Image (cartoon, rainbow, N blue to C red):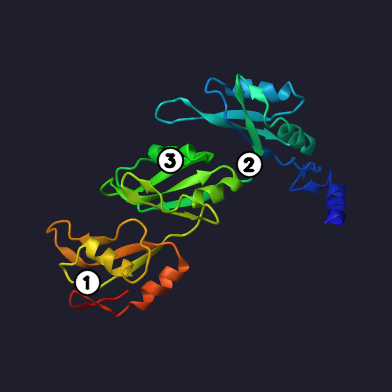
Amino acid sequence: DENDVSKALQLNGSELDGNIISIRKMLKEPKRRHMCCNNLNFDVSAKKLETFFMDNGISVSNANIVYNRETGASRGFGFINVSDENDVSKALQLNGSELDGNTITIMENRGWTNTFCANLNFNVSAEKLETFFMDNGISVSNARIVYDRETGASKGFGFVNVLDENDVSKALQLNGSEIDGNIIIIEGQQSRNSEIHRIFCGNLNLDVSAKTLQTFFMDNGITVIGNARIVYDRETGASKGFGFINVSDENDVSKALELNGSELDGNTITI
């Protein structure tokens, strides 16, 4: 409350535990706006990008270029931070300008839009997934494949962060496309923290494989994310009689739970 601010400032110079304390009002730090700059020449540095904007009368707090972690090469996009509303407008007016021979795209970045990709060939890398999207005209900040922590093998699904909200619809249109022999599933995620639900499956016949378990759910109209997993005894290699599947859709969670008490290979299973 502003009245309380005034009261607090009047306490400036008061004594507290033998010390004369100083109280002053702190100015609110202006909110920084994150601007994405795409289609950059691969030789453009952060300094050059910053200078480009400053030469156009825009106050930039910092600029950075995004590089490929493995090769160290520029990925052709970067970001600047501005704090003045007028500078945001000025920056957006530079969309379509030329910098080192490239016509650059400038837009305000309001946060990643997460796209979920499933039924991937286990050999598909993050780089390959990213390239697939970019080859289809979609601006991507990064792609990620989810790997099994114990074996290091791909789980057959991953995520792609799309820079432009308009590109989300393009990405969803790629649902059902083929990559490396697999028909992939692409779904939009409402946030970066969208959940994947793990479903426990108990009292399994000891001969039930991960493939059998996954097929059981898919035959019942449930989209399984990645692969089902059976838990085995590390010493004997025998099944422990339980496992897990992952689903991302709330409806699929309900469908899966309705299968509790079903029979699979002679056992009444618990879900």
Q: CA distance from mark 2 to mark 3?
A: 22 Å
**Which secondary structure lies at badge 3?**
helix
According to the picture, the residue beneath numbered tag 3 turns out to be: 132
Is residue 240 or residue 75 the one in the foreground? 75
Query: Seen in the image, is 65 located left or right of residue 177?
Result: right
Query: In the image, is 77 to the left or to the right of 61?
Result: left
- Using the image, determine if residue 233 lies above or below residue 16: below
Crowd class of label 2 (few under 14; some 14 to 19; many from 20; radius 10 Å)? some
Query: If you read the primary sequence from the N terminus, does the residue marked by circle 2 or circle 3 appear first?
Result: 2
* Circle 1 residue: 204
Local crowd size for mark 3, using a 10 Å CA cut-off: few (<14), some (14–19), many (≥20): some
Q: Which residue is mark 2?
A: 109
The residue type indicated by label 1 comes to Leu
Front: mark 1 or 3: 3
Q: Position of residue 155 (x, y in %)?
A: 32, 51
Residue 21 lies, in percent from the top left, at 78, 43
User: How far separated are the C-alphas under marks 1 and 2?
Assistant: 48 Å
Q: CA distance from mark 1 to mark 3?
A: 39 Å
